[in-house]
Image (cartoon, rainbow, N blue to C red):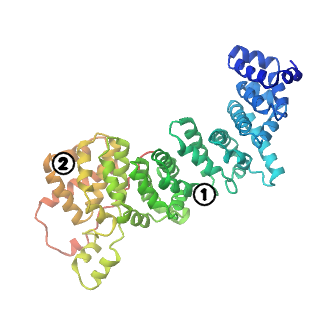
Amino acid sequence: MEVAAYRNGCTYKIWQLQGLAKDPACREYLLREGAVGIAAQLLSDQQLGENSAGLLRCLVSPEGSQKLIEAGGVDRLVKLLSADSAKTREAAALALYHMSAASPAFCTEVFTSMCKAMLEKRGDALVLAALEPLYHGEPEEGLAAAYLLNVLTAGPAQQWPDYFICAGTNAVLSLMQQLTMDSSRTAGVYAASCALTCLAALPVNQPAIVQELLSVLQRGNESGKQQTGLLLWRLLNAGATASTNPAVAAQCAASHDLVPGISWALHAQSWAAAGIVQALTYDGHRVTNSVTKGPDSDAIRLRIVAPEANVIPQLITLLGSQDTQAQAAAAHALANLTAYRSGSCEACSKAQRIGNFAPFAQQRGQAACPHQPQGRVLNSTAPSEVLRLLMASNDSAVVSACVAAISNLCATEEGQSRVHDEAKRAPVGMEGVKARLLQLVSGKVLSVRCQDAARNVLVRLESHNRKAPPISLMTLLLQPPTPVPAFPEP
C-alpha cells in the first residue's frame, strides 16, 4: 500500500476504508498493512485531512495509537484542530479523543503536542487554548472538544494542573453549553460534567466555574438546571470528610447570583438545589474556618430565608415529592436552616432594649425570632410536613434529616409548642408520634447522633405535657440543645 494509491482514489476510497475498518477482521488487516502510517501522512493534505482523521478514529487500538505516535501523526492531528473546516476540526478532535482513551501514553503525547503548539502560537502553553476554534464552532465541535477534555483532565491534568488554567479561554462556556444543551446526549453531558469537575479542582479555576454554574441556574432550561445543580452540589461536597468544601462554598457565598440561582433551580424541582442549600448551611466546617476561610453559614442562612427568595416554600414542596432523594435533600436543608443560633434580628433586639419581655425570651433561647431562619421555618407549614414525612417514610436518609430538623425546632419554647401541637394533630395522634420516636431510638436505622436527637424530641414532648414550672434562675440558664447538622453521604 502506498500513499499514491490513496491520492489516486481521492477521498472516496478513504471513506470506503473507514467503513471497512468497522469490521474487526478488516481493522486488523489494515493495521498490519500500515494504514495508520499512511493516514498519518495524508493528514498534511488539506483536502484529505477530514477523512484521514476519520479513518484513524476507526483504527483505534493501543497498537494503532503507538503506530500513530511513531508516524508523527499526533502533531498533525493537533494542527488540524485549527483547520478552516469545521468538519475537519471535529474529526481531528474525535480521533485524538478515541486514541487517547485507548492509550494513556498517547494521551500524554497529545498533551505535550498541544502544549508545544500553544507555546509557539501564544507563548503560554495552555492546553485549553488549543481547542479554542472548536469552542466557537458548531455544537458538534463543542461536543468533540468536551470528549477530548474529559480524557485530558482525567489524565495529564492530574500530573500537570498548571497547564489547564481556564483564564483567557472559552473552555468553561463551551463545556457549560454541552452540559445544558440536550439531556438526550447523556455521553456529552457526562463528559462535560467530568471535565468541569476536574478543572474546578484547581483553585484558580473555581471562581469562573462556580459563577457560571450559578448563572446557568437562573437562565438555563429545566434539564440544564438539573444538571448544573447536580454538578455544583458535587463540587460543594467533600466526600472524603463528609463536609462542605469551604473553598467552593466561599465562591458561592461571594456571588450575587447565589440566592436567585437556588430559587430558580428549586422552582424547576431540582433536588440538587436543596442539596446546595444543605451543603452551604452545614456547620461542620466551622471549626476549621480560621484555616480554610470557609463562609459564615449563619450569614448564608439569612440570605437564603429572605422572603423574596421563596426558598422555604419550595423546600416544603420538595418534601411532598415522590422521590426519596428529593425528600431527603429538602429535609436536610430545613434541618440545617433550623440550626441557626445567632439570637434576634435588629428590630427584635431594639424592642428588647426598651424593655419588651418577648425578645428577652428570644435572647435566652426560649423563643424564635420571627425574622430569623428558625422563626421563618416555624411560621411556615414546614413543621407539619416534616413530621408527616417522619411518620410516613422508611428511608433512613429522609428519617434522619426529619429527626434533625424537629430536634432543632424544639430548641425554643415556641418551637417545642409548635411540634407538640403538630404531633397532637397528626393522624396517629401524640401517642403514635411517641411510639415512632421510641422505635427510632431503640432501632438501628439512625446514627448515634440522630438517635440522641430523636431522644431529645421525645423528652421535649414528654416535658411539654407536664405542668410548666415557674420562671426561675434555673430556667433562665437553660440552654437549647446542640444543633444537629444534617449532611448526607454523597
Q: Which mark is residue 433?
A: 2
Using the numbered discs, state the Cα–Cα distance from disc 1 to disc 2 in whole angstroms.
Answer: 48 Å
> What amino acid is labelled 2 in the image?
Val
The mark tally for this picture is 2
> What amino acid is labelled 1 in the image?
Ala
Provide residue 135's location: percent of width, then percent of height.
67, 47
Provide residue 438's location: percent of width, then percent of height.
21, 46
Report whether 439 appears left or right of 181.
left
Question: For the residue carrying disc 1, how many other residues have a C-alpha within 10 Å: few (<14), some (14-19), or many (20+)?
Answer: some
Residue in view at x 52 percent, y 58 percent = 246
Question: For the residue carrying disc 2, how many other residues have a C-alpha within 10 Å: few (<14), some (14-19), or many (20+)?
Answer: many
Relative to 276, is 340 above or below?
Answer: below
Report whether 94 appears left or right of 332.
right
Q: Nearer the viewer, residue 119 or 4?
A: 4
Relative to 103, is 355 above or below?
Answer: below
Relative to 343, is 170 above or below?
Answer: above
Which image quadrant for residue 60? Answer: top right
Which image quadrant for residue 398? Answer: top left
Report whether 298 appears left or right of 288.
left
Q: Nearer the viewer, mark 1 or mark 2?
A: 1
Q: Secondary structure at mark 2?
A: helix
- Tell me whether circle 1 and circle 2 mark residues in contact (CB < 8 Å): no
Provide residue 147's location: percent of width, then percent of height.
64, 38
Most distant residue in the bottom direction: 354
Q: Secondary structure at mark 1?
A: helix
Provide residue 215's location: percent of width, then percent of height.
52, 57
Q: Which mark is residue 388?
A: none
Q: Which residue was labeled with disc 1? A: 208
State which tag comes first along the sequence, 1 or 2. Answer: 1
Quadrant in the picture for the N terminus: top right
Report whether 40 appears left or right of 353.
right
